[in-house]
Amino acid sequence: MKRYAKYIKAHQSLKELSALLADLPSPRTRFFNYLMRETGLAPNTLKMVLCSTQSGINPGNLVKKRLSNSLSVSEKLLFPDDRNAKGSLVNIYHNLFNKSVEYNELIDDICKATGASRKSVISWMYGRHSPKQYAKSRIAILLDSSMYHLFPDGDAKST
């Protein structure tokens, strides 16, 4: 079963579903919250630790040791001189998705079902454009819902 399937409700538009999925915690948010719990750092301090520019700060030795142990990665790898080096804490954080896994999975599934580009699907999901009839039909089948409920605004521009 798809991860997003449990969020699909009857009489829900594609725009409502995508907004719901976009509001779920992203992998980046989950990792940030995990780091806050592990380190005990305040959110703004942790943001400065995760800053990709040279203005970022390095945490103290106790925090470095705690993160190294909890992530099972050496301190040298997590906190190299180059903050953006591959495998560094900053690099790990910035390479995580900033949208929920369920949201990205829905986009990918709609792209596969309709043959549309990711950009077009996102435009449909935000209600900026409406898909053509054949795409609406395929999305309705994918989500096991009616086109009427998924696309209640019949006057939006088709792409």
Image (tube, rainbow, N blue to C red):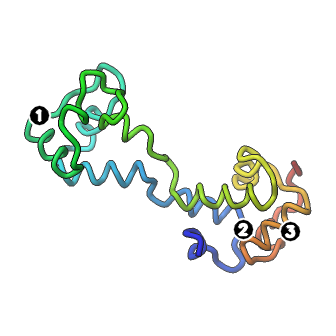
Circle number at residue 8: none
- Which residue is tagged 2? 13
- Which residue is tagged 1? 60
Structural crowding at the residue carrying mark 1, measured as other residues with C-alpha within 10 Å and reported as few (<14), some (14–19) or many (≥20):
few
Residue at x 72%, y 44% (from the top left corner): 119
Point out the tag, 2 or 3, that comes first from the N-terminus: 2
Residue 106 falls in image quadrant: bottom right
- Which residue is tagged 3? 137
Left or right, residue 41 beside residue 153: left
Residue 151 x %, y % = 80, 65
- Kindly report which numbered mark, 2 or 3, lies closer to the viewer in this rendering: 3
Residue 133 x %, y % = 91, 62
Amino acid on which the number 1 mark rests in the picture: Gly
Amino acid on which the number 2 mark rests in the picture: Ser
Residue at x 59%, y 76% (from the top left corner): 1
Point out the tag, 2 or 1, that comes first from the N-terminus: 2
- Cα distance between the residues tagged 1 and 3: 56 Å
Residue at x 25%, y 49% (from the top left corner): 35
Vertical relation: 2 (above or below) 97: below
